[in-house]
Amino acid sequence: MARDATSSLPPQDVSGAAPSWAAGRSLRGASENRLGERVIRGLLMFCGLLSVATTFAIVAVLIGETARFFAEVSPIDFFTGTEWAPTFTPAKFGVLPLLVGTLQIALIAICISIPIGLASAIYLSMYAPERVRSILKPALEVLAGIPTVVYGYFALTFITPNIVQRIFEDARVFNALSAGIAVGIMTIPMVSSLSEDAIQAVPRSLRDGALALGATKFEVSTKVMVPAALSGIMASIILAFSRAIGETMIVALAAGATPKFTFNPLESIQTMTGFIVQISLGDTPRGTLEYKTLFAVGFTLFLLTLMMNTLSLWLTSKFREEYE
């Protein structure tokens, strides 16, 4: 009589519980996963703490060197003076010419980037076919990848002689208007891309509902989509303004190096970043009062950009719209 083939198999646990070797493998796998998660979490925490520590270190250096500068120069004279000549005799340490020049460049820039960037965002999100949008948006963002030194030479060799000086005959070769236009062109992709993302984030039901009620695309864009995405649009404008304030190479090449307290955009000026470039060339001895102006101007620039970023966060929270 043949022996049953199943009689040679090891006994099975009919209770449904996993074998002991399978349970051990599962426990080892779970332990390895937990260890890997702890390692990744530790690395991410280290990177975050390193970023915060770097920021605090930069701020500490700025505050320390600025305090040494203000130990020799009155803060009132620094923030209210209208003459800036730290390397001359007698030295003048009024930062207002640099501050006015910086804000002048930034204001001209956003006057260029806001209408063009916002119009581009509305066209890409509301009017452009998908194929056209897939081509135009990357092409527009290419502007953000062009080196700023190229924009500087473009402003100096093309914008000034072919646009500014043809319209305003008394414009100088180095002037704030040309530099502001170039900075505005550079910041168009920032306004356009961020605004377009904000408009795309608005629920499609709002647009479809407005179109169903008989509104035109222009009415939907200006009265429904833009107000609904206003927080993101405002944030993009503030970020573009902050980017224009911190621009260096364009203003160093096209705006000149004359720290004048003037509101005339056709004259040569100097911005805070332009002065930092001038001092950083190495002609000023380290540790001197003139050298310390580098940190005082840098700290002023830091406060200005910090105020703009804080304003951006406040506007974003104030005009934020939440949808379900």
Image (spheres, rainbow, N blue to C red):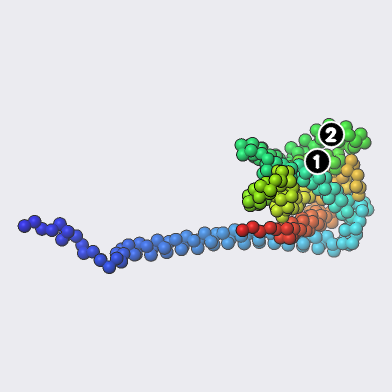
Which residue in the structure is indicated by mark 1?
Answer: 181
Residue 172: image tag:
none
Q: Residue furthest left?
A: 1
Image quadrant in which you'd find residue 29: bottom left
Q: Quadrant location of residue 43? A: bottom right
Q: CA distance from mark 1 to mark 2?
A: 10 Å
Element carrying mark 1: helix
Residue 206 x, y percent position in the rendering? 66, 51
Check disc 1 and give the amino acid type: Ile
**Identity of the residue drawn at 77% across and 48% down:** 244
Depth order, front residue of 280/113:
113
- Left or right placement of residue 73 versus residue 215 in this view: right
Is 226 located above or below residue 127 in the figure? below
Toward the front, the furthest residue is 213
* Residue 81 horizontal side relative to residue 130, left or right: right
Q: Which of the pair 296/206 is nearer the observer?
A: 206
Q: Position of residue 174 (x, y in %)?
A: 86, 39
Q: Is residue 108 visible?
A: yes
Give the quarter of the image for residue 50.
bottom right
Disc 2 marks which amino acid?
A: Ile
Q: Residue at x 66, y 50 (%)?
A: 209
Q: Residue at x 80, y 33 (%)?
A: 158
Labels 1 and 2 touching (C-beta < 8 A):
yes
SS label for mark 2: helix
Quadrant where the N terminus sits is bottom left
Q: Nearer the viewer, residue 103 or 219?
A: 219
Q: Earlier in the sequence, mark 1 or mark 2?
A: 2
The quadrant of the rendering that contains the C terminus is bottom right
Residue at (90% x, 47% y) in the render: 263
Label 2 Cα neighbours within 10 Å, binned few <14 / some 14-19 / many ≥20: few
- The residue that label 2 is drawn on is 163
